[in-house]
C-alpha cells in the first residue's frame, strides 16, 4: 500500500461543497459557494478551467467517458459541461435545488435528488 502524503492544497476563495475525481486520478473537479466548478490538474495543482454556474455548486457527477461534467446548483439547475473546452452543453431548470446527482449506467439519464423530496 502506498503511503499517503499531501501533494498540494486547493487554492480556493470560497468553501468547496463538491469534489469529483477522474478515473486516472489526474484531474480533480471542485464546486464552490461562489458559483464555480473548477477543473484542476492534480499533478501540478493548477486550475485548468473555471466554469461559472448559476448558483452554489452543490454536487458534481462525471460521465463514464469523462467528457461531460454535470453540476447541480442552488439556482435549481443541472448543467452539463464539456470537460475539455469548459463550454456549457446544456442547462435544465428544476422546481427545487438539488442535493446530489447520479448518472444511469448508459450515461443517458441524469438523476437529481432534492432535499426532502
Image (spheres, grey):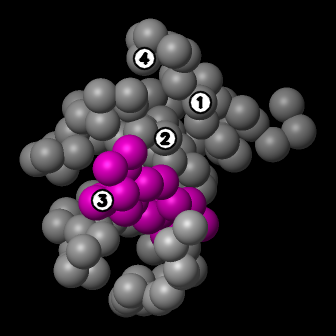
Disc nearest the viewer among 2 and 3: 3
The residue sitting at 74% across, 36% down in the picture is: 114
The residue sitting at 50% across, 31% down in the picture is: 93
Residue tagged 3: 27
* Residue 43, placed above or below residue 53: below
Asked if residue 55 can be seen in this view, the reply is no
| Alpha carbons under labels 3 and 1: distance apart | 19 Å
Residue tagged 4: 107
Tell me where residue 38 appears, x and y as whole percent. 33, 65
| Alpha carbons under labels 1 and 4: distance apart | 9 Å
Q: Which residues are magenta?
A: 17-33
Q: Secondary structure at mark 1?
A: strand
Residue, far front: 1
For marks 3 and 1, the one nearer the N-term is 3
| Alpha carbons under labels 2 and 3: distance apart | 13 Å
Is residue 90 shown left or right of residue 73? left
For marks 1 and 4, the one nearer the N-term is 1
Amino acid at each position: 500500500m502506498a503511503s499517503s502524503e499531501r501533494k498540494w492544497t486547493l487554492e480556493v476563495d470560497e468553501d468547496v461543497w463538491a469534489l469529483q475525481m477522474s478515473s486516472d486520478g489526474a484531474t480533480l473537479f471542485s464546486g464552490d459557494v461562489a458559483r464555480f466548478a473548477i477543473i484542476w490538474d492534480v499533478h501540478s495543482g493548477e486550475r485548468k478551467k473555471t466554469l461559472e454556474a448559476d448558483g452554489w455548486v452543490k454536487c458534481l457527477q462525471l460521465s463514464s467517458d469523462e467528457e461531460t461534467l454535470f453540476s447541480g446548483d442552488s439556482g435549481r439547475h443541472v448543467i452539463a459541461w464539456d470537460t475539455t473546452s469548459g463550454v456549457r452543453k446544456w442547462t435544465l431548470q428544476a422546481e427545487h435545488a438539488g442535493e446530489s446527482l447520479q448518472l444511469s449506467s448508459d450515461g443517458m439519464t441524469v438523476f437529481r435528488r432534492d432535499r426532502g423530496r
